[in-house]
Image (cartoon, rainbow, N blue to C red):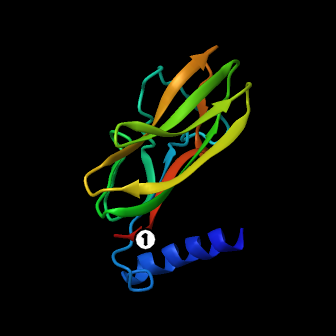
Amino acid sequence: MELHLMLFLCVAVCSFTGKAVAGKGPLVYFKALLPKNSNPASLKSYHFGVGSIIPFSSVEANIGRGYNPSSGVFTVPVSGYYQFRALFQTTGAGHSDFELVAQGSRKALVTIPSAIDSTTMSATFHVNKGDHVFVKKFFDYGNAPLRQGLWSQFSGYLLRKD
């Protein structure tokens, strides 16, 4: 937990200074959420069909400009090892499966087993400059939409440049 907090703090500090992490090269980091409803009293849900790429369109950070909020696709700006994380929470009945896809293949898969349940998916792997990484709905049983805001998010950062 402390290591993740230290990495996050380093990312935050370096993003404001414009410096590289430990001289290893440029900093790359993004974090995007499903947008919040403008009315805080109401809960907004997002429905995505099977096979849909999830466009987390409310961008909190996009250092390196690799994440496209319109498409939901992260285009790798610097080759190296990255860690990606996605958090999901459903608001309806049924269950859903989501996958993390990179270089055309599945890197991780999670199932949200019941209504109003949440889970996190995380994976670390090597990608090359220009590769695409995204989160996609793989299976849906019972129309389980995703909850807005911090409850559903996608992030990634460069751990080590080639």
Q: Secondary structure at mark 1?
A: strand
Q: Taking 53 as reference, is 83 left or right? A: right
Residue farthest to the top, as pictured? 142
Rendered residue at 47%/20% (across/down): 49
Front residue (pair 133, 108):
108
Front residue (pair 18, 99):
99
Say how many tags the image has: 1
Q: Taking 118 as reference, is 140 left or right? A: left
Let me know if residue 124 appears in the view.
yes
Q: Residues within 10 Å of mark 1 (few under 14, many from 20)?
A: some
Residue 136, percent from left and from top = 46, 33
Rendered residue at 33%/39% (across/down): 71
Residue 26, percent from left and from top = 34, 75
* Amino acid type indicated by mark 1: Arg
Rendered residue at 31%/62% (across/down): 79
Rendered residue at 54%/51% (across/down): 123
Residue 72, percent from left and from top = 38, 41
Residue farthest to the left, as pictured? 130
Question: What residue does disc 1 label?
Answer: 160
Q: Quadrant of the C terminus?
A: bottom left
Let me know if residue 62 appears in the view.
no
Residue 94, picture quadrant: top right
Is residue 13 depicted above or below 159 in this figure? below
Residue 53, percent from left and from top = 41, 32
Is residue 149 depicted above or below 30 in this figure? above
Residue 16, picture quadrant: bottom left
Q: Taking 86 as reference, is 17 left or right? A: left
Residue 126, picture quadrant: bottom left
Front residue (pair 101, 13):
101
Q: Quadrant of the N terminus?
A: bottom right
